[in-house]
């Protein structure tokens, strides 16, 4: 198995609640190398672009509003089987259904306000990391 990269986002709910450091600690504790990291505040246009795949879904506007209400922390994580491993550490999308000890169970409060995002496949990981980071930032 080879070393792969994935995108992780600490969402506005977790950043505002002061959980950023604890979530980064969980990331490192679970064997991920943080290759790149930055904090930013998405504009509506940026959030719409990132979540364009969901633009026809009924939750799209609420998702964009949520993701622009405060700062986020974006990271590129690296390790063997990074996408599946990060998704396991995050837990189920709905914190109520997430396993104990996962980030979403610990810090998420609802289906939308679930603390973190992670790429769901290798092709989306590539697209998503390039959305937030340029080549000079990911050496």
Image (cartoon, rainbow, N blue to C red):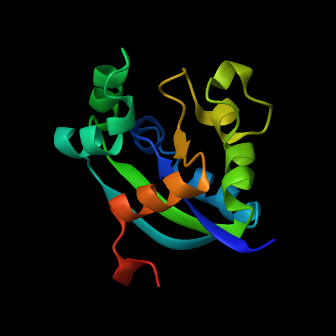
Residue 90, located in which quarter of the rendered image?
top right
In percent of width and height, residue 15 lies at 43, 45
Question: What residue do we see at 26% from left, 49% from top?
Answer: 41
Residue 32 locus on image (x, y percent): 68, 67
Can you name the residue that lies furthest to the front here? 123
Q: Residue at the location (32% across, 47% down)?
A: 71
Rendering coords of residue 84 (x, y %): 72, 51
Question: How many numbered discs, if any?
Answer: 0
Left or right of 43, for residue 11: right
Quadrant containing the N terminus in the rendered view: bottom right
The residue located at (25%, 47%) in the rendering is 42
In the image: residue 8, left or right of residue 97: left
Residue at far top of view:
58
- 126 above or below 136? above
In which quadrant of the rendered view does residue 103 lie? top right
> Foreground residue, 120 or 117?
120
Residue at image location 48% in from the left, 50% down from the top: 9
């Amino acid at each position: 198995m080879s070393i792969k990269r994935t995108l992780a986002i600490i969402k506005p709910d977790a950043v505002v609640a002061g959980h950023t450091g604890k979530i980064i600690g969980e990331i490192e504790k679970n064997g991920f190398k943080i290759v790149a990291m930055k904090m930013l505040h998405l504009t509506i246009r940026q959030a719409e672009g990132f979540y364009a795949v969901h633009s026809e879904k009924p939750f799209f506007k609420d998702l964009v509003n949520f993701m622009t209400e405060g700062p986020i922390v974006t990271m590129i994580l690296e390790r063997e089987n990074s996408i599946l491993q990060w998704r396991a550490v995050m837990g189920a999308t709905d914190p109520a259904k997430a396993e104990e000890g996962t980030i979403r169970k610990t810090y998420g409060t609802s289906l939308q306000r679930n603390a973190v995002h992670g790429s769901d496949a290798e092709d989306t990981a590539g697209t998503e990391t390039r959305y937030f980071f340029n080549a000079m930032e990911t050496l």
